[in-house]
Amino acid sequence: MKVVLEKVTDPEKEGAQIRAVEITEEIRNAVDLLENNCRSILVTKMHEERSSGETYMLGTNLIYYTESIDKRTYVYTKDMCYETKYRLYELEDLLSSNFLRVSKSLVVNIRKIRSVRSELNGRMNAELLNGEKIVISRSYVKDLKRKLGV
């Protein structure tokens, strides 16, 4: 891959351009790194439905979605589940513009969405890159379509 670095004198002219044949997970991670400065949040590793006590700094670029269940907030990556002390509204503020609330209890990373499908009842179903399926509530469909450019 060819990399071109150009020094500019005006901060408003700063930017990055990526040209790729295919948008892979690595390309998405590079974009996240450039856009987010790869922020991290504190999470606790989940094991057998209870906390194992191990605390990690998890890069927000690895998060697929966050969900609130029974007053607890869970963070899901490609193949792991963590618990965090943050509430969903706090995570919405901490996470980048790539994250969008899609239901009362769920915030999704739109860069991790593989496909979306409309349902008859006004809701949408989304399949994530890891194969998981989530439901987008009717009241959030308009925001998701705007964000995705659909």
Image (spheres, rainbow, N blue to C red):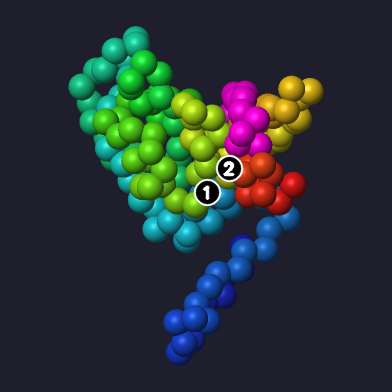
Q: Seen in the image, is 24 located left or right of residue 109? A: right
Gap in Å between the C-alphas at discs 1 and 2? 6 Å
Q: Which residue is mark 2?
A: 110
The span shown in magenta is 129-141
Mark 1 lies on a secondary structure that is loop
Specify the amino acid type for callout 2. Ile
Residue nearer the viewer, 86 or 132 = 86
Residue 117 visible in the picture = yes
Q: Position of residue 25 (x, y in %)?
A: 58, 44
Q: Image quadrant of residue 50?
A: top left
Q: Image quadrant of residue 122?
A: top right
Residue drawn where x is 40% and y is 19% of the image: 69
Residue drawn where x is 40% and y is 30% of the image: 75
Residue 127 visible in the picture = no
- Callout 1–callout 2 Cβ contact below 8 Å: yes
Q: Seen in the image, is 55 located left or right of residue 38? A: left
Q: Residues within 10 Å of mark 2 (few under 14, many from 20)?
A: some
Specify the amino acid type for callout 1. Asn
Q: Residue furthest left?
A: 53
Residue nearer the viewer, 96 or 104 = 104
Q: Which residue is mark 1?
A: 98
Q: Position of residue 11 (x, y in %)?
A: 45, 82
